[in-house]
Amino acid sequence: MNATLGIAIAMVLILTVIVMLFAMQAKKHAKHRKHKLLAAIEALAGKHHLDVEYQDTLHNRIIGVDIKKKVLVFADWKNENVHTEVIAVKDVKDCTLIKRGNKIVEKTKSGKKATDEYVYEIQMELILPDGPIYLTIYNEMIDGVLEKQLLTDVATKWREHVIKLMD
């Protein structure tokens, strides 16, 4: 009985160490990703002579703005690479939020219709003369379900920023 208890304790300790190693690796990877995103925003700012006065750092992306020059900067981490956009807000004709997902309409027991919405992605669509640009603010696969409301609020806030700068 004591040997079995000892083996069980040893297995729990080994599993705990393995989980801790994975957690440390994930934290290190997140820190590396954030550093790369910040470096990309700084490089964009330097290249285009921008003063990014305000920015939000999300899990895999950063969005910022030079208010005086009315320029939006965006960096997104995809497939282990940073993708960037620099958008002159003066060129933006319209700015909308697109929620990608499904709506489910069901009848309740009382006969009324109930609608449930499932959103897996939120993008800010910027209409430019050359065509639209889509900036992903929320993606369920990357950000997780628990972040949806927070990132919905962030997307709404940035849409309002862009609309104010368009005037």
Image: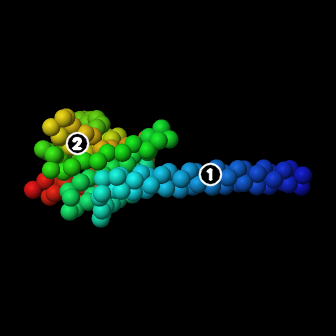
Q: Position of residue 166 (x, y in %)?
A: 13, 53
Amino acid on which disc 1 is placed: Gln
Occupied quadrant, residue 42: bottom left
Tell me how far mark 1 sits from mark 2, CA to CA: 34 Å
Occupied quadrant, residue 85: top left
Q: Nearer the viewer, residue 105 or 112?
A: 105
Q: Which residue is at a point 26% across and 60% down the rendered structure image?
A: 66
Amino acid on which disc 2 is placed: Glu
Q: Which residue is at a point 19% across and 34% down the rendered structure image?
A: 131
Q: Position of residue 133 (x, y in %)?
A: 25, 39
Q: Which residue is at a point 34% across and 52% down the rendered structure image?
A: 47
Q: Which residue is mark 1?
A: 25
Q: Which mark is residue 151?
A: none
Residue 167 visible in the displayed image = yes
Q: Which mark is residue 125?
A: 2
Sequence-first tag of 1 and 2: 1
